[in-house]
């Protein structure tokens, strides 16, 4: 049996786990073609992976600052607000908001900072004339647990050199940005957070049925697996903002599956639904269902269009039974005219933080979790392959009804 060494390549599934006051976080990364002759891991992790075979699993824990740069007080700075250049491309007229992340290149007049620097910094607080920024890594003060599962090993055909991949940097690039700063709510909601390019009725925009997939096959499978893991069999399920597919695994067998969406033709085409209703949540956030009538609610690749998310989350809490689960999943693609303004301003990991704030602000959900899955190869038959070689990333936030 092949084992990991300098003469083999390995596909490894990495799972990063950590906690914050807001909940539990799990970030999954598929590392394809890891080359142990050339690529880099921290020494302890490198040694733990050597000589492992397909199916082997390792677990390691690291204290804060062991796998990412350690937190330093010198990277927490008080600066003049005029140093924040919110009018720079590509996001003109940005205002600094507490808890938010921004590209370091937006800062001016600070030594060693250049406009092309996209490394994120966090705005910790904003005053009338000054602001406090944190340029440390988002995970710098967090204890991390890493699981690595060896999925496939194959011999090298040749060794041509090339670039060195620092895998832990890639795995940890983004995680941590979904958690709050010092446990305080992030300021996502200052106007005009929920404005859109197209403010005409959504029923007009969605009048024509779109019987197409909005994420690739790999992402759909990952979402189905997540729903299958979190939703118990024979549950009464509400598919919120539904369409012609519901993304549940075929073996889940819910007792009922009710769809709520905007297009009658799409909902009629969804053969998994046992019932459906056409309803515009942006016009009327109240759900046309009785209280405590569902065990689970899912919202797939649609939360970014909600203009009244707090009201909708209140309604989801109302229609869920005690202990019921609300799962929100999304990716990095959307309809530009209808997406809310704040969504377009955020790093993809910050969007989990935004949705997490919807849950936390509601006060009727507990056991909140975030999840991400990245790095998978895009299916070769997908229309965006090979221009986009990686599959669409998957992000999820969920909580249980108190």
Image: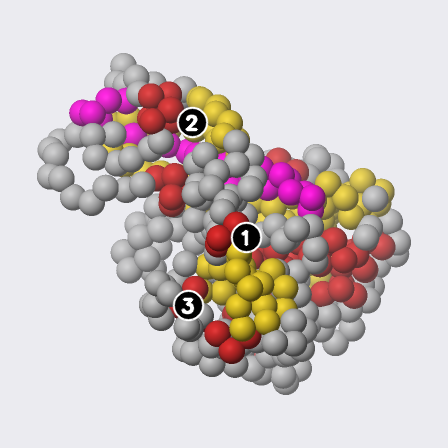
Place of residue 349 in the rendered image (x, y in percent of width and height, measured from the top left): 52, 54
Label 2 SS:
strand
Viewed as shown, does residue 104 lie left or right of 360?
Answer: left
Q: Is residue 302 visible?
A: no
Q: Nearer the viewer, residue 116 or 205?
A: 116
Are the two marked residues, 1 and 3, in contact with CB atoms closer than 8 angstroms? no
Q: Quadrant of residue 53?
A: top left
- Numbered circle sitting on residue 149: 2
Q: Quadrant of the N terminus?
A: top left
Are the two marked residues, 1 and 2, in contact with CB atoms closer than 8 angstroms? no
At x 58%, y 83%, the residue is 198
Give the residue number, with chain letter if any, for mark 3.
110
Disc 1 to disc 2, how far (Cα)?
A: 25 Å
Q: How many marks?
A: 3
Q: What residue span does the magenta drawing correspond to?
A: 4-28
Which sits earlier in the primary sequence, circle 1 or circle 2?
2
Disc 1 to disc 3, how far (Cα)?
A: 23 Å
Q: Residue furthest right?
A: 291
At x 33%, y 21%, the residue is 47
Vertical comparison of 274 with 303: above or below: above
Disc 3 to disc 2, how far (Cα)?
A: 42 Å
Secondary structure that dominates the magenta span: strand
Place of residue 204 in the rendered image (x, y in percent of width and height, measured from the top left): 62, 81
Neighbour tally class for label 3: few under 14, some 14-19, many 20 plus, Cα within 10 Å: few
Which sits earlier in the primary sequence, circle 1 or circle 3?
3
Q: Nearer the viewer, mark 3 or mark 2?
A: 3
Label 1 SS:
loop
Neighbour tally class for label 1: few under 14, some 14-19, many 20 plus, Cα within 10 Å: many
Q: Residue furthest top?
A: 1
Give the residue number, with chain letter if any, for mark 1.
177
At x 24%, y 22%, the residue is 5
At x 43%, y 53%, the residue is 392
């Amino acid at each position: 049996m092949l084992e990991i060494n300098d003469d083999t390549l390995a596909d490894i599934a990495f799972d990063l786990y950590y906690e914050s006051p807001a909940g539990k976080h799990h970030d999954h990364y598929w590392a394809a073609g890891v080359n142990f002759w050339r690529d880099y891991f921290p020494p302890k992790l490198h040694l733990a992976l050597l000589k492992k075979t397909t199916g082997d699993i390792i677990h390691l824990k690291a204290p804060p600052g062991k796998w990412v740069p350690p937190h330093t007080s010198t990277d927490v700075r008080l600066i003049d607000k005029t140093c924040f250049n919110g009018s720079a491309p590509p996001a003109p007229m940005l205002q600094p908001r507490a808890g938010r992340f921004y590209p370091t290149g937006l800062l001016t007049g600070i030594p060693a900072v250049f406009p092309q620097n996209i490394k994120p910094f966090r705005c910790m607080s904003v005053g009338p004339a000054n602001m406090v920024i944190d340029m440390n890594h988002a995970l710098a003060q967090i204890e991390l647990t890493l699981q690595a599962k060896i999925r496939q090993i194959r011999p090298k055909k040749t060794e041509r050199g090339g670039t060195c991949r620092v895998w832990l940097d890639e795995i940890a690039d983004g995680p941590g940005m979904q958690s709050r700063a010092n446990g305080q709510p992030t300021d996502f909601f200052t106007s005009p957070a929920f404005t859109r390019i197209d403010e005409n009725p959504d029923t007009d925009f969605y009048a024509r049925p779109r019987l197409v997939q909005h994420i690739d096959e790999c992402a759909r499978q990952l979402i189905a697996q997540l729903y299958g893991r979190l939703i118990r069999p024979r549950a009464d399920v509400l598919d919120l903002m539904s369409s012609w597919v519901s993304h549940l695994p075929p073996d889940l067998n819910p007792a009922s599956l009710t769809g709520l969406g905007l297009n009658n033709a799409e909902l009629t085409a969804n053969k998994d639904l046992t019932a459906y209703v056409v309803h515009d949540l942006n016009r009327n956030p109240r759900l046309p269902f009785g209280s405590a009538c569902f065990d689970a609610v899912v919202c797939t690749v649609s939360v970014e269009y909600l203009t009244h998310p707090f009201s909708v989350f209140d309604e989801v809490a109302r229609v869920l039974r005690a202990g019921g689960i609300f799962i929100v999943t999304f990716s990095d693609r959307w309809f530009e005219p209808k997406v809310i303004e704040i969504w377009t301003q955020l790093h993809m990991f910050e969007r989990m933080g935004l949705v997490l704030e919807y849950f936390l602000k509601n006060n009727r959900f507990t056991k909140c979790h975030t999840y991400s899955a990245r790095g998978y190869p895009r299916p070769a038959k997908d229309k965006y392959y090979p221009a986009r070689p990686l599959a669409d990333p998957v992000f999820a936030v969920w909580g249980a009804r108190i």
